[in-house]
Amino acid sequence: MNWIADRLRKQTDSKESGPQSVQRGYDSEARRLWSRFVQGFERDLDAYRQQKGNADLQRVSEFGCRVSNPAANTAVTVAADMSDQTIRYAYEPLAKATAVPEDDS
């Protein structure tokens, strides 16, 4: 997400300056981009459901959501860590016999 910080620096250079205004700009941009990210998931899930797929999205925190697919017996929790400027995916099986990608952390 370094491109976000770069974009914010350029915007704030032409406006007000100072650490508080930069942080406010970053927080605002981070919320806006996370919202767009989740909206993209929602659009994808709507398209999947139109093809008779079954999946759900739940918002679990301000910067986290969970997508589950009962037919595939899998779910993924997606969380943005704004301080680290990362997005993490944690897969989980919905059934004991289901394999999912392992967490590398």
Image: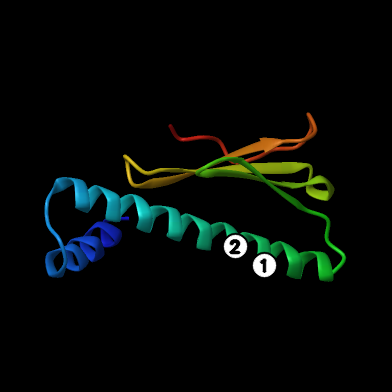
- Residue 18 appears at what percent x and percent y? 12, 51
Q: Amino acid under label 1?
A: Arg
Query: Camera-side residue: 49 or 103?
Result: 49
Q: Which of the numbered marks, if any, corresponds to residue 103? A: none
Q: Quadrant of residue 95?
A: top right
Farthest-out residue, front: 16
- Could you tell whether 24 is left or right of 45 in the image? left
Q: Amino acid under label 2?
A: Gln
Q: CA distance from mark 2 to mark 1?
A: 6 Å
The colour scheme is rainbow
Q: Which residue is tagged 2?
A: 39
Decide: is 62 above or below 44. above
- Residue 7 appears at what percent x and percent y? 24, 65
Contact, mark 2 vs mark 1 (Cβ under 8 Å)? yes
- Could you tell whether 38 is left or right of 9 in the image? right
Circle 1 crowding by C-alpha within 10 Å: few under 14, some 14–19, many from 20:
few
